[in-house]
Image (spheres, helix red, strand yellow):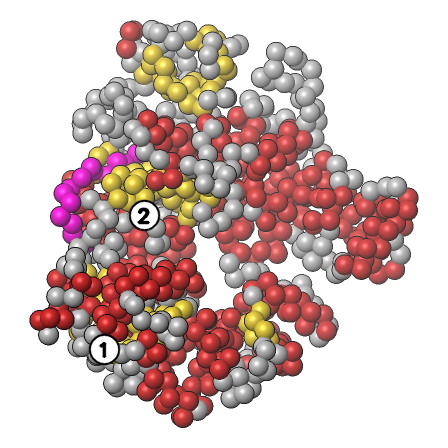
Amino acid sequence: MQQLTDSPLLRGLNSPQHQAVTLPAEPALILAGAGSGKTRVLTTRIAWLISTGQVSPYGVLAVTFTNKAAREMLARLGGMLTVNLKGMWVGTFHGLCNRLLRAHHRDAALPSAFQILDSQDQLSAMKRLLKAMNVDDQKFPPRQVQSFINNAKEQGLRPQQVDDADGYNRKFVEIYQAYDDQCQREGVVDFGELLLRSVELLKRSDALRGHYQQRFGHLLVDEFQDTNPLQYEWLKLLSSPATGVFAVGDDDQSIYAFRGADVQNMHRFKREFAVAHEIKLEQNYRSCGHILDAANALIANNTGRLGKNLWTDAGSGEPIRVMESASDMLEAYWLVDEIRNLVAEGRARSEMAILYRSNAQSRVIEQALFNAGIAYRVFGGLRFFERAEVKHALAYLRLMENPHEDTAFLRVVNFPTRGIGARSIEQLQDQARQRGISLYAAAEYLEGKAGGAVRTFVSVIESLRFETQGLALKEMVAAMLDRSGLIRHYETEKEGRERIENLQELVNAAAAFLAEERFSPEAPANLGVSGANDDDTGLIGSPLSMFLSHASLEAGDNQAAEGQDAVQLMTIHSAKGLEFYAVFLTGLEEGLFPHENSISEPDGLSEERRLMYVAITRARQRLYISMAQTRMLHGQTRYNLRSRFLEELPQETLRWLTPRVDNRWSGAGSSGALAEAAPAGRWVRQGMGDRGSASPSFQKPAIAGHTHDSGFYVGQAVRHSRFGDGVILALEGSGSEGRAQVNFKRDGPKWLALGVAKLEAAE
């Protein structure tokens, strides 16, 4: 055995890692903390078992949560072993279930060449079924039906097992049964069906279950905390008392309850498998000590944990920088400042990540990065103006500005659904082509049921145009969201809340645009206005037309090209599994993070805290935490209290860049207004800002509306010979020490020494 433990495979492993890799073939739970080398342990465990002759590749089943992780595992194993790995089952739950059903398609009552429906294919099949059943898709929206069926399958329920006590639910069950029949008839399966049918097959066939229990002597599962009840049952069916089940996970990183993940599976596994070996991987190879101390202290507030404490031998590192801004716009400008400082230090933009709790937060951040000319990439999602729901809303606005724009017309004529199919559209296009007119104008020539449906849509646009005459841009956008039916449509979707938040954020985007361009917020959206920034006076277009142009340009510009060095933007959920040199964690406010909905949900606050834990542990060296006293979110101005999570962090790990005072606000303004009052006790940065002393000096700034001793005031329009036009955001100091923070239209916010910079009043 001594010879075996000297294997090259084991070199470089710490003691708990070594212990985990060389465990006997018994159920084991490996609590692998963030950055503790769990992937290496899992891969080395497989290589160790095979190299020591305990199992052949044929006898190993390894489950990952992404195809990418499966490919990486096989690539690593290929570099560690000289044996043929072709017979090994490594993949996702869906991938392995597909493999099982292909091999036993007759027993599973499936054709040999059955096809798999992805989510979009499934939705299309649902729409076709509802039409065939003459079901009102307004009362039973296809996406809602799809969600109902998928949820039932995740729970392992067939139609006859679903509670149908009330009439409304009974209709869903009826559709579920019809959908099952349709899929069976056509020889297709969706993702949920892959797992459910595999479980049913293993339950039904003792011989088949016994075969695979005998074949797979070792089951290894990654990200065990993210398994749902049906996946857990599938693993139980494939294991026997003699199976070495090696479960690797971290209950502190269980953040996918909304997808059906059940962290209690880890506790069930310990109990039901009589786990004798529980090993904690606590040494972190990613983050510095201050970051880990903060993460440990935070997560300790959760109850029912399996328990572990991350540590590192890399030293304490830099403290966590905490910034409190007056508004979300100023928060975004501060992010830009810090990113520029990091770039000046020689750090790559790709090593910086901006994390947010809600996708809707990205809009203000994107705007600031766009204005500053900093390339960025939205990871795992789309830039704000490229999101489908936002593009739908913009299409309605474009039709309100110009009803004869065919591209916008085609995008929303049947969204939300109005019973206008492809054939109706073809007929409308034929009419338009014959007469040389727009689709909008051609609607009156379309006959029959199709013509009636199209004209109903036209009447919606006409009503919107009439009812919003004279309204300001912000009010116009809000009215459009209501009258178009977009909000109501997404209210029926399981994950529609995020889309609604993005639509509401479009209202804020409109207000911010007007402020940035220095137009009156009360200016009628559909009337030409004077050029506020131009030397030429005259009309330059309506606020609506200019906003639509801005949205198109911002959607198309500044998107990082493939391989280009760019700042990474993402939700915290998307950041799991990633790491960065510097992480900016934004929006640490009550109601946003933790999210307001978490308070009323079972285990909701605990999951939010786990999400915070994940966010903190993404950072290697630099972690920034920011919050805003006022934030425009979901169409409303919010006056915020600091997140409770900040109070749960050890204060010795933090460096406040603003003074720690009670939550009070000075000059609460809209996030869109660039000329806002600075917060009481604004900081004076020493040298390069946060790289000064831990206890910076503070001076009281000038308040909006009050003239500074320099003669300038907050909110004043100014001009600089190099940077052009801008607006003063803050004024500090006096005499030769006086400074101004100016938001320049072209270059974004900059601090200027008033004794040196030649600022001129632009008015």
Residue 136, horizontal then vertical, whole percent: 70, 68
Q: Picture quarter containing residue 282?
A: bottom left
Q: Up-down: is 325 above or below 729? A: below
Q: Amino acid at mark 1?
A: Gly
Look at the numbered disc 1 and give the secondary structure of its residue: loop
Q: Picture quarter containing residue 184?
A: bottom right
Can residue 713 be spotted in the picture? Answer: yes
Which residue is nearer to you in this view: 244 or 753?
Answer: 244
At horizontal 49% and vertical 42% (from top left) the residue drawn is 562
Which residue carries the number 1 mark?
A: 53
Q: Confirm whether the magenta stretch covers residue 699.
A: no
At horizontal 57% and vertical 28% (from top left) the residue drawn is 514
Res. 579 mark: 2
Name, please, the residue furthest toward the left.
2
Of callouts 2 and 1, the N-terminal one: 1
Can residue 29 be spotted in the picture? Answer: no
Residue 206, horizontal then vertical, whole percent: 40, 92
At horizontal 44% and vertical 31% (from top left) the residue drawn is 374
Q: Up-down: is 334 above or below 434? A: above
Instruction: Give the residues in magenta.
Output: 309-325
